[in-house]
Amino acid sequence: MLDQRSLLGVADLAPAGALAILDLAEEYVALNRRRDKKRGVLRGLTQINLFFEPSTRTQASFELAGKRLGADVMNMSVGSSAVKKGETLVDTAVTLNAMHPDILVVRHAMSGAVALLAQKVNCAVVNAGDGAHEHPTQALLDALTIRRRKGRLSRLTVAICGDILHSRVARSNIALLDKMENRVRVIAPSTLLPPEIDRWRVEVFHDMKAGLEGADVVMMLRLQTERMSGGFIPSVREFHHRYGLDHEKLAAAKPDAIVMHPGPMNRGVEIDALVADDLERSVIREQVEMGVAVRMAVLDLLARNIPGEGAA
Amino acid sequence: MTLILANARLIEPETGADTPGAVSIEGGHIAAIAWGEQPAAPEGATVVDCGGHALAPGIVDIGVSVGEPGARHKESFRSAGAAAAAGGVTTMVVRPDTQPPVDDPAILEFVRRRAEESAPVRVHAMGALTKALEGREMAEMGLLLDAGAVAFSDAVRPVADARVFRRCLAYAQGLGALVIHHPQALDLAAGGCATESEFSGRLGLPGVPALAERIGLDRDLALAELTGVRYHADAVTTASALGSLRRAKEAGLAVSAGVSVHHLTLNEFDVGDYRTFFKLAPPLRREDDRAAVVEAVGEGLIDVIASGHRPQDEESKRLPFEAAATGAVGLETLLPAALRLVHAGALDLPRLFRALSLNPARLLGLPGGRLAVGAPADLVLFDPDAPWILDRATLRSKSKNTPFDQSRMTGRVLRTWVGGRSIYDRAEDA
């Protein structure tokens, strides 16, 4: 069970809560592979996907998750309309709140924005990514993928590689993997690391092969296009040379190490196409599948805390 | 007509005295001071019994932003003046960051007239250092000086271009004017909204390295040395910048420094869960920096404590942290917050009032800031030990963006006089 109204981050998730989500998600993985994928646990509930920042896969994943559980799902991309008219985040939240949604799934380009919005509404809020802060369902789906492949979610060596500085995926993953007692390494040039990351209970590497040595899991991050030239790294080709995952560098990891990527990939930048498509090693497509199941589990567990008739 | 403030605990920053006594006021000035033994009041004098509470020279607050002209919904001279009176601030030195900015003598005259009409405290205005505070061309400093500007500043906007800044300093030096600047290497600080640290990294907030302040200050001090101008850094908040400041002072440069009370009493962790009322410029610092700056105030390396008063409306604060406006109101909380340093043993009361009253008055060439015969009777009576909890709704500022909402405060202003005239009495207020 999950004894909270909202899921704003991994930071406020107890290990037992995380495991409850993963266990329920396993059931939904099985359900999603059947012909009839429909459950009615969210019937009658309204889910609004509120995306202040464009996203294709995360939004689709949440939409499918809600629909398979029987919720009425509405997608709103706010970046284009209301914000241009000068409406603030809080105004948008208050307006939507008046329409009595039960679950808001929110993405915003600024750290802390989803928590701010959650203070202004009285429904469940799921953080689908806030700035460089948290993306909890991504960490959970990664955890589920790891657990299914490795048979456990502890005492593993996980190397996270690439643009850690701007990555909410990295922050949520570091937090969750640390809670589950894994060894976490980060591999990046100094310019793409958060300040004082050495205090985060992670091992820091600038050399990729050294960082991959003995790793069970290799987690690649997307390098945003706008950071590619000159500002944070000299060039794409230099980054690819030093930090792009190819089979040669991957050979430093354990022979059965799995390769992950939250997508969308920049092939030939942070990951070589041959590695990305290597079904022996790459679990990138499986991550997408786990994403729907994990989000179903999160929505289901949060919905159980929504007061029913008479209870309110 | 004589007013006698009797049975007081006199706090004199210049001599460091902290003794029982009485102050006698005539014609808006201090006419006599009785240290220790208090003579009987002369016939016909009005006597106020101070109840043994602390009586100190009124606060001279350098660097107050008021929304007139341009943003009166945030703060007017009336509301700022009322807040100042209730905070024991008897002189406000207002910044030029209005809309339009005070880069034209006509605007300065408007500001002075509005202040005269509606604020019960003394108000002096800074003029802009550069036109429109844009850091490109110098403002008409000579004309502004003649119109009454007491110093020149671009408020919290540093002049990024060293060549422009050098010329401004050289020109100001020729006028004998004081330049008040916000030391910060803008290119290094660009895009940041929190002090770069483990904490900001975990929150995912773009960081400003603390070093941006030292690099900015180093440049400013080098140019101050080159030009010989009187230079005041409005906010020195990091340990590493203190070293630069110390060397410049030891070399005999005409430089001084201030800090806001917020940077002395709060640290980066107070931002907590993206609380935008704690978003300041410069951002709140690490605890070791805060402690170093408190020590620097104690030894006099940092000369001035100010409120850093910057009113912001609710809308501009009710935003994601990165997008929210910077600044906090502080006129009314300056003294109670600064008393935390006294209660923590970092300063004694005379030392505190050197930084709040005496030093800023000297810096600007104003006659106040002292308990001395002939000085203006700008005084604050306060109970340094009165406990209370701040409710931001009760603040007199139009904007309520205080970081001290619901905080426990120890020490409260009881009465304020400007030129011997009572402008605040807590007994009538409650």
Image (cartoon, coloured by chain):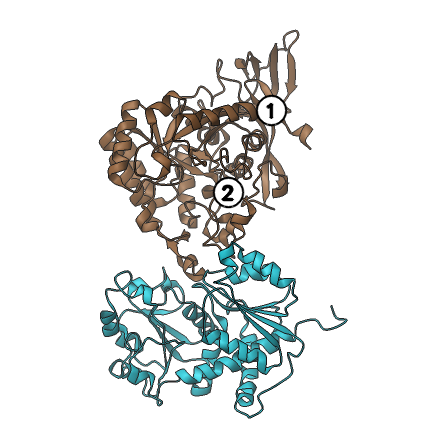
Residue type at numbered disc 1: Ile
Q: Is residue B151 above or below residue A312?
A: above
- Classify the position of the N terminus of chain A by image quarter: bottom right
> What colour do you see for chain B?
brown
Find the residue positioned furthest to the bottom: A35
SS class, disc 1: strand
Find the residue positioned furthest to the right: A310
- Whole-percent x and y of residue B105? 40, 25
- Whole-percent x and y of residue B233? 36, 36
> What colour do you see for chain A?
cyan
Identity of the residue drawn at 52% across and 23% down: B116
Residue nearer the viewer, B78 or A159: B78
Chain hosting mark 1 = B
Crowd rating for badge 2 (residues with CA inside 10 Å; few <14, some 14–19, many 20+): many
Badge 2 or badge 1: first in the primary sequence: 2
Q: Which residue is mark 1?
A: B423
Q: Image check: B248 left or right of A49?
A: left
Asked whether the viewer can see residue A301, the reply is yes
Measured in 3D between alpha carbons, the distance from the residue under mark 2 to the one under mark 1, in whole angstroms, is: 24 Å
Asked whether the viewer can see residue B18, the reply is no
Residue type at numbered disc 2: Ala
